[in-house]
Image (spheres, grey):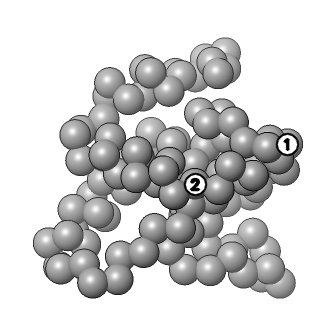
């Protein structure tokens, strides 16, 4: 879906490094189709794997493709290692709720 003044998913994918594109694909494979939340555990990662993950995640966040979904509000924690894929890039069943959640996340 292309929003006025914003690049679409194809535009963004060609801008990504190989590592960031692979991470995006892994997050999407683990994504809940209801709300675009994706659980991605780094348990057992080596220090170099953690460093690579953080670098690739930063790239995705900078392009507005992914946000960390730690909590929506203080009364409703989501959990650890949860990320949200921008609902403008990947539609989900609860699209309106996902769009509202995306706007609240930092």
- Give above or below for 1 relative to 79: above
Q: Is residue 32 left or right of residue 11?
A: right
Q: Secondary structure at mark 1?
A: helix
Check the picture and name the quadrant holding the N terminus: top right
Residue 84 rendering spot, x and y as whole percentages? 59, 55
Label 1 sits on residue: 96
Residue 99 rendering spot, x and y as whole percentages? 77, 44
Residue nearest the viewer, comparing 38 with 71: 38
Residue 83 rendering spot, x and y as whole percentages? 55, 62
Residue 80 rendering spot, x and y as whole percentages? 54, 80
On the question of residue 55 being in view, the answer is yes
Q: Quadrant of residue 104?
A: bottom right
Please name the residue shown 24% across and 38% down the image: 17
Q: Secondary structure at mark 2?
A: loop
Q: Is residue 69 left or right of residue 35?
A: left
Image mark for residue 31: 2
On the question of residue 67 being in view, the answer is no
Q: Is residue 55 left or right of residue 6?
A: left
Q: Quadrant of residue 3?
A: top right
- Give above or below for 8 relative to 76: above
């Amino acid at each position: 879906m292309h929003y006025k003044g914003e690049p679409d998913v194809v535009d963004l994918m060609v801008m990504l490094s190989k590592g960031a594109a692979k991470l995006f694909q892994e997050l999407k494979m683990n994504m809940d189709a209801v709300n675009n939340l994706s659980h991605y555990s780094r348990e057992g990662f080596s220090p170099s794997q953690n460093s690579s993950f953080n670098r690739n995640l930063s790239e995705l966040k900078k392009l507005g493709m992914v946000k960390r979904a730690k909590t929506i509000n203080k009364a409703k924690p989501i959990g650890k290692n949860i990320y949200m894929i921008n609902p403008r890039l990947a539609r989900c069943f609860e699209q309106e709720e996902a769009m509202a959640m995306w706007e609240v996340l930092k």
